[in-house]
Image (cartoon, grey):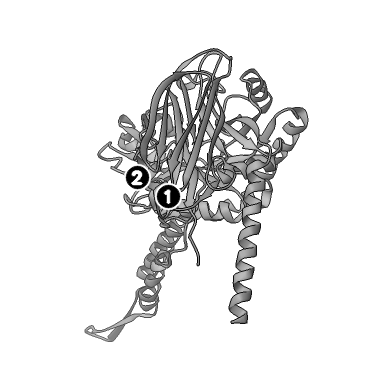
């Protein structure tokens, strides 16, 4: 009885301490920091230097840049049955070519040159790609080169280099099968056939050895073994048309263990291009020579990545996904894939919520009609520091917005009050079963003018409030908490070129005791 009482007192003390921490966090001053997330420089596939990006960031009124340089951007295709030996590879600039230590040194240097901006290093990783079709049929297609992860906040060379383990394939004992040919090779080497013949005058014995056959088998085994070892270096099996998400999960887990954040990138974007084979001929090697002889360069190679929202449900442990970017997005609609993921968290089917990120995907001015700062992620941080920004991103204390011209929408307040203090995006309010809940929303235009906008408040996947009003908007609603379990609220304001998307605020019904 004494032990049970002590345990209850200890649990109550922990709960009170946790509630006090939550209240302290809720009341901590929040500084809005506008970031451009998913940016490439000349270190990888961008066309601007870091100094040029700094000028673009200031002109757009941004506070910082989240760089996501390509980590390892290359694809290879091999000719069956020696795919490892007869192969062509195409490689683009990346962090692995530039060097992880050199990349982070560039970040350190640009922070000194431009201390008014926050610089957060990251990489864009391609977990896996695969091929379909064939060169002979001239319908060769490489898939999922844009099914990528943004890995952010890996601030040391060792942590960034840890990703190389995720990029390598799992060891497959099947690659050793050519060693089975050594047994028949040895058998042939030792085999001797004796033929005895008789002529008119004498007897003749002929001994036949099979050393040539043994050498041929050994040569074939060596070629196949070398071929298999080269294939084993590939991330996964690039000739498996159903690769799954195991390789992506390895990247997520590695980044998380290294203290980084991971976001699925542009999950609904469609990438579909075709390249003439002669454009790749310079990289051809042995396969390129064979291709020229056989006339394969009359065809083309397709590069295709289809929307992959299903991977958001099949993987776990990642921080969030690109929820606002310059494309048609369905996942954020009420009752869509994002709400399914958030509801799974409430129901206990996922250990952590999934946050929605504003993703710029910037390589240079004018590409796909993009301008620096069109898509922003506004972090509600406790201080103007990289560590504080990463903490806020991990906790979901941020919102995404899209802008054009000279103004944008600003989320001045979005909070929920239960039986305690107000909480903001990423936080959880506690309330008694059936108790009163207060939801507040305040939105303005950055230029201070009156702008008509459509407002949607989504409650647990369902449209709860919908109206059109002119900025500035400051409204408050009262709701009732569910009898058990939890709920969440999130906000979507505007549409098209002027758009704002918040992360959810959670509501959890307190259990009654006694």
- The residue under the point 40% across, 27% down is 327
Residue 51, position as x, y percentages in the image? 69, 25
Q: Nearer the viewer, residue 219 or 67?
A: 67
433 shown above or below 89: below
- The residue under the point 43% across, 64% down is 172
Mark 1: secondary structure: loop
Q: Which mark is in front, 2 or 1?
A: 1
Instruction: Measure the alpha-carbon separation of dots 2 and 1.
Output: 55 Å
20 shown above or below 454: below
In what quadrant of the picture does the N terminus appear? Answer: bottom right
Q: Could you say which quadrant of the image residue 105 lies in?
A: top right
Residue 109 relative to residue 286: left or right: right
Residue 514 relative to residue 23: left or right: left
Q: Nearer the viewer, residue 179 or 247?
A: 247
Mark 2: secondary structure: strand
Residue 381 relative to residue 344: left or right: right
Number of marks present in the image shown: 2
Q: Nearer the viewer, residue 471 or 409?
A: 471
Q: Is residue 487 visible?
A: yes
Per the image, the residue denoted by label 2 is 131
Residue 4, position as x, y percentages in the image? 58, 77
Direction right: furthest residue: 112
**Cβ–Cβ below 8 Å for labels 2 and 1?**
no
- The residue under the point 62% across, 81% down is 2
Residue 252, position as x, y percentages in the image? 51, 51
Q: Could you say which quadrant of the image residue 121 lies in?
A: top right
Per the image, the residue denoted by label 1 is 434
């Amino acid at each position: 009885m004494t032990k049970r009482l002590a345990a209850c007192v200890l649990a109550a003390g922990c709960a009170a301490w946790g509630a006090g921490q939550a209240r302290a966090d809720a009341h901590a001053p929040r500084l809005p920091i506008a970031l451009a997330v998913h940016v490439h420089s000349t270190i990888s596939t961008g066309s601007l230097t870091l100094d040029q990006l700094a000028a673009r960031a200031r002109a757009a009124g941004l506070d910082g840049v989240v760089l996501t340089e390509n980590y390892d951007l290359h694809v290879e295709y091999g000719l069956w049955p020696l795919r490892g030996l007869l192969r062509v590879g195409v490689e683009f600039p990346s962090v692995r070519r530039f060097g992880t230590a050199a990349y982070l040194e560039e970040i350190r240097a640009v922070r000194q040159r431009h201390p008014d901006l926050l610089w957060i290093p990251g990489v864009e990783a391609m977990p896996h790609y695969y091929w379909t079709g064939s060169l002979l049929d001239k319908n060769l297609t490489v898939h999922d080169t844009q099914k990528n992860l943004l890995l952010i906040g890996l601030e040391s060379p060792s942590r960034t280099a840890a990703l190389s383990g995720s990029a390598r394939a799992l060891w497959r004992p099947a690659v050793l099968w050519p060693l089975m040919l050594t047994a028949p090779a040895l058998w042939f080497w030792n085999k001797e056939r004796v033929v005895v013949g008789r002529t008119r005058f004498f007897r003749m014995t002929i001994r036949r050895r099979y050393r040539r056959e043994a050498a041929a088998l050994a040569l074939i085994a060596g070629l196949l073994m070398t071929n298999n070892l080269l294939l084993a270096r590939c991330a996964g099996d690039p000739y498996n048309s159903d690769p799954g998400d195991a390789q992506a999960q390895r990247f997520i887990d590695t980044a998380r263990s290294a203290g980084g954040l991971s976001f699925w990138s542009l999950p609904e974007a469609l990438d579909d291009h075709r390249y003439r084979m002669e454009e790749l001929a310079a990289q051809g090697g042995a396969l390129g020579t064979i291709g020229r002889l056989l006339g394969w360069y009359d065809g083309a190679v397709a590069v295709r990545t289809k929307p992959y929202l299903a991977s958001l449900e099949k993987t776990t442990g990642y921080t969030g996904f690109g929820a606002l970017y310059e494309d048609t997005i369905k996942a954020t609609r009420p009752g869509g894939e994002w709400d399914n993921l958030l509801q799974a968290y409430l129901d206990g089917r996922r250990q952590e919520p999934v946050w929605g990120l504003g993703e710029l995907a910037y390589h240079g001015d004018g590409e796909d009609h993009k301008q620096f700062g069109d898509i922003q992620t506004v972090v509600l941080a406790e201080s103007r520091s990289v560590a504080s920004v990463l903490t806020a991103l991990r906790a979901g204390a941020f919102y995404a917005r899209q802008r054009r011209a000279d103004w944008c929408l600003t989320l001045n307040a979005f909070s929920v009050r239960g039986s305690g203090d107000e909480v903001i995006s990423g936080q959880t309010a506690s309330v008694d079963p059936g108790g009163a809940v207060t939801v507040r929303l305040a939105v303005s235009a950055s230029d201070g003018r009156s702008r008509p906008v459509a407002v949607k408040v989504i409650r647990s996947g369902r449209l709860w409030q919908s109206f059109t009003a002119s900025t500035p908007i400051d409204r408050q609603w009262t709701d009732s908490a569910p009898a058990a379990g939890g709920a969440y609220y999130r906000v979507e304001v505007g549409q098209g070129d002027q758009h704002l998307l918040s992360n959810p605020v959670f509501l959890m019904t307190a259990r009654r005791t006694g």
